Image: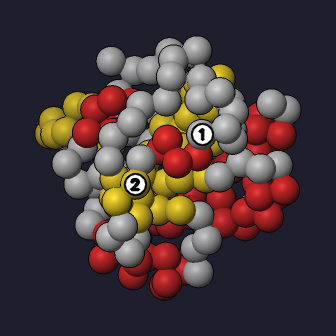
Amino acid sequence: MMLQQGDAIPTGTIKDADGVEFTLARYAGKPLVVYFYPKADTPGCTNEAKDFTALADEFAAAGVPVVGVSKDKPAKLRKFADKYGLSVILASDEEGTLCEAFGTWVEKSMYGRSYMGIERDTFLFDADGRLQRVWLKVKVKGHAQEVLEAAQAL
């Protein structure tokens, strides 16, 4: 079930690229961008993370942390971040609890084969932890800029 506008931010324990556990509640009192991506170090996911990183100063100036979530292990996220100089917070949801809570773990299809995977979706929460905007099945080009503009308007 996908989150709806006005819903509270889900709380599930995830790990950062260094393996440290946290919940999204640590950002309480600030607007927050949470984006889900299928797999670290693949072309679309790399470009998306690089685009958010390129705008990191503007997100910081607006007081809006950006967290990218995948089911990759923390060690893979650390390698991904280091390889491309990524400054966004990358989080590992190996168990998929946050993916389930956000509704991003979906049935996908490629070459006639069905499988479960993470849909590339982005969520913008206000400082009260309420969902303000959702971007589904994101196309990477120009997306980070669009999210920044929406975040700055909060």
Quick check: 81 left or right of 98? Answer: right
How is the structure coloured here? secondary structure
Q: CA distance from mark 2 to mark 1?
A: 12 Å
Number of the label disc, if any, that sits on residue 22? 2
Measuring from the top left, give residue 43's x and y in whole percent.
Answer: 46, 65
Q: Secondary structure at mark 2?
A: strand
Quick check: 37 left or right of 59? Answer: left
Residue 88, quarter of the rendered image:
bottom right
What amino acid does circle 2 point to?
A: Phe
Residue 147, quarter of the rendered image:
top right
Determine the residue positioned at 67% across, 38% down.
29
Considering depth in this image, is 100 or 22 the residue closer to the camera?
22
For residue 146, say whether it is visible: no
| Whether label 2 touches label 1, CB < 8 Å | no
* Vertical arrangement, residue 111 with respect to residue 94, above or below: above
Task: Give the mark nearest the N terminus, 2 or 1.
Answer: 2
What amino acid does circle 1 point to?
A: Ala
Considering depth in this image, is 71 or 18 the residue closer to the camera?
18
For residue 98, say whether it is visible: yes
* Vertical arrangement, residue 76 with respect to residue 113, above or below: below
Determine the residue positioned at 52% across, 48% down.
26
The quadrant of the picture occupied by the N terminus is top left
